[in-house]
Image (cartoon, helix red, strand yellow):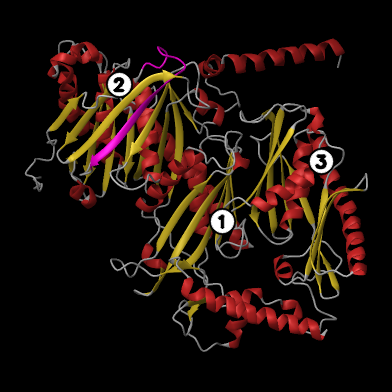
Amino acid sequence: MAELFLFEKQTQQNLKKDRMAAKPATTSTTYSPIDPIHKTRPPIFSNSDVDWLRPDSRSFHQCRPAFFRTGAVNSAAGSAYAEFGNTKVIVSVFGPRESKKAMMYSDIGRLNCNVSYTTFATPVRGQGSDHKEFSSMLHKALEGAIILETFPKTTVDVFALVLESGGSDLPVVISCASVALADAGIMMYDLVASVSVSCLGKNLLIDPVSEEESSQDGSLMIACMPSRYEVTQLTVTGEWSTPNFNEAMQLCLDASAKLGKIMRSCLKEAASDVQE
Amino acid sequence: MEIDRADGRNPNQLRPPACSLNVLHRAHGSASWSQGDTKVLAAVYGPKAGTKKNENPEKACIEVIWKPKTGQIGKAEKEFEMILKRTLQSICILTINPNTTTSIIIQVVHDDGALLPCAINAACAALVDAGIPMKHLAVAICCCLAESGYVLLDPTKLEEQKMKAFAYLVFPNSILSVLPEGSSLVQGEPMDHGIITSVTHGAMSVDDYFHCLERGRAASAKLSDFLRSLPSQLPGDISKAV
Amino acid sequence: MGLPNASEDLSAEMEVDAFRRLFPLRYFERHLSESIRPDARPLGRARDTTISLGAVASADGSALAKIGSTTMLAAIKMEVMTPSLESPDEGCVSIDFHMPPICSPIVRPGRPAEAAPVVAKQLSDTILSSGMINLKELSLVSGKAAWMAYLDIYCLDADGALFDAALLSAVAAFSHLQIPVVSLDYDGKIVMVTEEQKEENLENQPVNKDKRKLTLSSIPFSLTCILHKNYILADPTAEEESIMETLVTLVLDSSCQLVSLYKPGGPVLAYTSAVQDCIALTRQRVKELQDILDEAISGMEID
């Protein structure tokens, strides 16, 4: 516990230092009135760490309510909108369509992924540029689930736009993308459901929000195919003890199975609407 | 209602246009067009084989590249490129040379008001010089509306800044008008009264807009005559222009 | 339902679909001669339009506007700037329009759509020249600090009449905008006043006491029409725009002043009568849009 408090103090000091260092270097002509110190202080540490509350008053092992809707973008072959608390994401799928001219001949299909943020997705206005890291992680997470052999020589494009970033952005993008792929009728072995867990001291928080992510010691994200019980991607960062790690994995897998059911029911609903 | 203009013109008076064709030797057609101190150079390359991506391969493709006097191109220049491209597309006969691209490069030499109309006139003259098949010529004009409601034509940069609204208008220079006067007035609205392009800035009443339209049309006749007389100014180049 | 009957239905449908793809212009002209459009609209009718305010929680003002399936998300973020010497009592508005790759099969990542900068320019020209926003209201401390309103509009689904939907979402976002409460700190910087600080009764006087809204005068609304032969089609879809190329965009404000008449070329010439017809259609549309916006705003106030 003492270590935890020490950690908190250090981060605060670091933040202060960062801010002071950043001050003379600010070259941009405008600035946001949001105070960075105030914004990043983890409110969960305000009391003793036994009975602290999560910012949205969930329990540690409780996910945010998940909402999916297909057919968000008419001009795409398939699309989905996902909302987990304040995290709001749209994914469009185009294709299978002609690959770029420069591409070599390929017996199997190609998958092309792109994740970008809106300028207003984060509390402080951003650049709204492409997120290269998430783009390649999304590609890796979906690659294993799609039956690429069913569309040789062509490309399926999966484009995601994060409308609002409220934490656990990548897992939401991955889950939403697999719903969009299903909506586009792309053949997959199974839906890909993805959940992340943050480690704060000895506690595990599932489906963390931005504030929790900014003060975490470690994070673990799993993308898996629930009905096959297979993992397509596993990302671990930060400090983890073995028992913690095992517990976190199990938490993620259980949550993914539940998330998979929600995704499935969304697709079923959309299909039954069409039939009517 | 008398207004004094800095250069002593009356409100309906245009700055005397000047144009020379075939000023560049490597280009297939070129023209330099100036109205007062505003001067634009236009060069035409093409028709070249192939169309740009996403263009219709059954029609000729027109590409416009805008080169500002200094600096890089921004949103305003992109908009000019798009307006020019759409305007020129509507006066060229695109079906004669399908699956080709014609590039028009506009170099701004000096901007002293009414830049876009000047560029459209220059591009039009350069297309004539290059012998690109066209339905008719286009004449572009800038009308300004002052706070008190009077209309100024062909403003300088200084006048442009003082105005509450202005409209860039492009009219066709119809083939019919070559015929004796009167015969072009077949219907209530002769062909050269139609608007090819209209771009406005600033709020004005609808009546003011129609007022601008009327003044612009009247003045465009003079520009039309000037544009039509161009090929004959260069005796050596008649064959190229026809 | 008998089996042969069903297959016959299908084959008839296939033929129409094939005809539509092979001879799009003739397909449309057949409809136009009957004064109807393929989506069952009369020529002068715009598609169903909805506005929802406050779609983005991380922004100071936001709105989602839908015209048919064309969807625009606009959000405003307020930042602080030092006003220019020429206008020390005025803030600034910066408007940008984005077409991310999700919105249309034509847009690919890394290659921005050609239309995006043009629509962005048109939007900022329209909004700033309409005089809807009084820039003086964005002032904080004369000569020292003023608001810079960053308005970003994202096209989420592109199906024609992009400018109309973008302008509608922008106007709605401005009417939803709440200017945050801020105070001047010791370094001369403007900082946000949070709820808890308000209760603490802080020593720094807030620069503006309460969250406030902008007063919007003469709000601009627009309608895009297609001119084709003698027909005028209001609020075109992407398919219609690609087949019939002459577009006219009219912007009128609530007092029926003409803010913009935008016709970038096109094979059909606009004669006075056609322009007048378009203006009449736009007048009607302005009323419709004004009602839709008012309804959205009053819906917000009840919440």
C-alpha distance separating marks 1 and 3: 30 Å
Residue highlighted by disc 1: A119
Q: Secondary structure at mark 2?
A: loop
Quadrant showing the N terminus of chain C: top right
Chain where mark 1 sits: A
- Mark toward the start of the polypeptide (1 vs 3): 1
The residue range painted magenta reads B93-110
Chain where mark 2 sits: B
Q: Position of residue A106 (x, y in %)?
A: 73, 28
Q: Position of residue A270 (x, y in %)?
A: 79, 39
Quadrant showing the C terminus of chain C: bottom right
Q: Which mark is residue A267?
A: 3
Evaluate whether label 2 is on the same chain as label 1. Answer: no
Amino acid at pointer 3: Leu
Q: Residue at x 30, y 21 (%)?
A: B28
| Quarter occupied by residue B222 | top left
Given the current orientation, which residue lies at the most extreme left position?
B8
C-alpha distance separating marks 3 and 2: 59 Å
Q: Which mark is residue B28?
A: 2
- Crowding near pointer 1: few (<14 within 10 Å), some, many (20+)? many
Q: Position of residue C73 (x, y in %)?
A: 57, 50
Q: Is residue A96 magenta?
A: no
Evaluate whether label 3 is on the same chain as label 2. Answer: no
